[in-house]
Amino acid sequence: VLDARAKHLSIPDTWAVNAKGEPTTDSRDVHALLPVAGPKGYGLMMMVDILSGSLLGVPHGVHVSSMYKDLTKGRDLGQLHIVINP
């Protein structure tokens, strides 16, 4: 989205929504990204948010700062790495 915004290009309507929650193709009008893979992607995203946010004591959910408003400001985000030995 940021690359498309810098190049003044449009994005697919399945990538993001505007402030009204409507799908948008305007990369400058993005308010939130849509999850990849629909409901399954949303569930996975929710678990990642819970595990890498609330368990680590960093902002999660609606408390995460926007990555689109102030590009010069740092963001306080957490990371979680799960390694599984198959």
Image: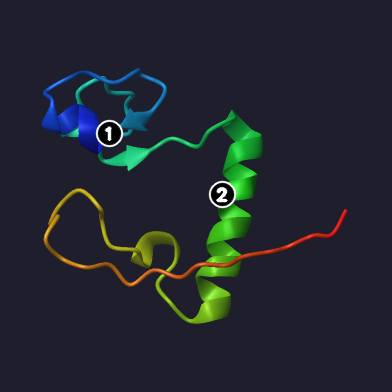
Task: In the rendered view, tell whether residue 80 sits above or below residue 41.
Answer: below
The total of numbered circles placed on residues is 2
Q: Which of pointers 2 and 1 indicates the residue nearer the eye?
A: 1
Helix, strand or loop under label 1: loop
Q: Residue at x 25, y 55 (%)?
A: 66
Mark 2, residue position: 45
Mark 1, residue position: 1
Q: Nearer the viewer, residue 54 or 21?
A: 54
Farthest residue, direction right: 86
Helix, strand or loop under label 2: helix
Q: Give the numbered dot on residue 44.
A: none
Farthest residue, direction bottom: 57
Q: Residue at x 58, y 77 (%)?
A: 55
- Is residue 8 shown left or right of residue 68? left
Task: In the rendered view, tell whether residue 60 sits above or below residue 37.
Answer: below
Q: Residue at x 59, y 30 (%)?
A: 37
Task: In the rendered view, tell whether residue 3 sits above or below residue 72.
Answer: above
- Is residue 69 shown left or right of residue 22? left
What's the residue type where badge 1 is placed? Val
Badge 2 vs badge 1, beta-carbon distance below 8 Å: no
Q: Where residue 49 sits: x, y (%)?
A: 53, 60
The Cα atoms of the two marked residues, 2 and 1, are separated by 18 Å
What's the residue type where badge 2 is placed? Met
- Is residue 83 shown left or right of residue 31? right
Give residue 82's quadrant in the image.
bottom right
Q: Residue 32: in sight, yes or no? A: yes
Give residue 80's quadrant in the image.
bottom right
Q: Residue at x 40, y 72 (%)?
A: 59
* Colour scheme shown: rainbow
Q: Where residue 28 sits: x, y (%)?
A: 15, 32
Q: Earlier in the sequence, mark 2 or mark 1?
A: 1
